Image: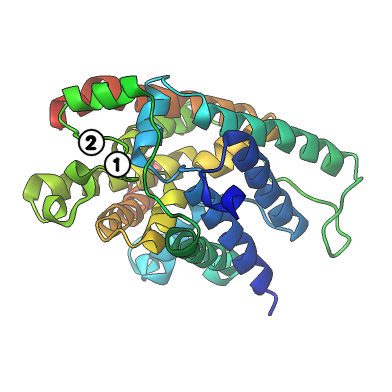
Amino acid sequence: MKYIKFFLVGILFGIVMSKAEIISWYRIYEMFKFQSFHMYGIIGSAVVIGMANMYFFRKKMVKTFEGKEVYVAPKKKGMYRNLLGGILFGLGWALAGACPGPMFVLVGKGVVSIFVVIFGSIFGAFLYGLLKNRLPH
Amino acid sequence: MEFITQPWAWYVAGPIIALVMFLLFYFGERFGVSSNLETLCSIGGAGKFVDYFKIDWKQNAWNLIFIAGAITGGFIAANWLSPTDVVNLNPQTVQDLADIGIANAGASYLPDEIFSVETMLSVKGFLVLLTAGILVGFGSRWAGGCTSGHAIVGLSNLELPSLISVIGFFIGGLTMTWLILPLIL
């Protein structure tokens, strides 16, 4: 039963990704062509509101539903990891026109070929795990 | 009802995504979709080959449930909330795409030239889809996050690693869109 809330939040996420056309390959192309404000407005407004949320979490004005402090685990530091990993991700994002969230939402839309992209991304994650110790971080 | 069925503007979508992030924190978890790729590796038995995947994946089960919800949400939106599949693109974008071989841009969510079943069943089309996926999976795990974990949560939390990653996302994305896509389409 404790998982139902995550399922419901996921449904909201899937609907907003679809209705705002974030799952459209074209919207990603348009963004990287700087020909529309749409995606920048979405990410920008989410981040601005997110910053306010983080402030409330840090000031302990908002706690989790169990009354615990909200802990925001910091991301791992490392110039190579973040820049080189980010560049590879960006190449894939612009080619697939989808990042990991939208890939799964497109399954719900009934796009058969997206399974090839999802299989590739799982295999890519496996390759990372395989090569991790040989990569700069 | 028209408010729901028309395409949602950025100022509707952005706050809802922030709400999704807030709710996950409120429920004690952190918004980040690409972690699921590692979890799926672990479930698939990757731990037998690589120690990195020897994790107790059940602690990430909430995130898989979240993804199951996202798939369901995509189904609901496609079947009941979207009377049309048309994406209103900048006319310049439509022209630019026509110039590199993608016709009727915006007539539906995805270009047939990349996503149709016929394209998928061709060698080149299959390799394009597979390569795109491998880059997304490998890159996001190396960087430790994707658009959700780095661009939304990380930037909201003013984290330098996320800023560096997002700069990387754009270096890669701009390179693909401006330089590589015209060559491979």
Residue at point 49%, 23% (across, down): B167
Badge 2, how many Cα within 10 Å: few under 14, some, many 20+? few
Task: Give x and y (percent) for residue A135.
Answer: 37, 37
Relative to B80, does residue B165 appear above or below in the rendering?
above
Q: How many marks?
A: 2
Task: Give x and y (percent) for residue A133.
Answer: 39, 44
- Which of the pair B121/A66 is nearer the observer? B121
**Which of the labelled discs sits on residue B107, or is there none?**
1
The reply to whether callout 1 and callout 2 are in contact (CB within 8 Å) is: yes
- Which of the pair A8/A120 is nearer the observer? A8
Residue at point 33%, 62% (across, down): A110
Residue at point 72%, 55% (across, down): B23
User: Would you identify the image quadrant in which residue B110 lies?
Assistant: top left
**Which of the labelled discs sits on residue B104, or is there none?**
2
Residue at point 33%, 46% (across, down): A131
Going by the numbered disc 2, the residue's amino acid type is Asn
Of all chains, the one bearing label 2 is B
Badge 1, how many Cα within 10 Å: few under 14, some, many 20+? some
Task: Give x and y (percent) for residue B164.
Answer: 53, 25
Q: In this orientation, does residue B175 appear?
A: no
Of all chains, the one bearing label 1 is B
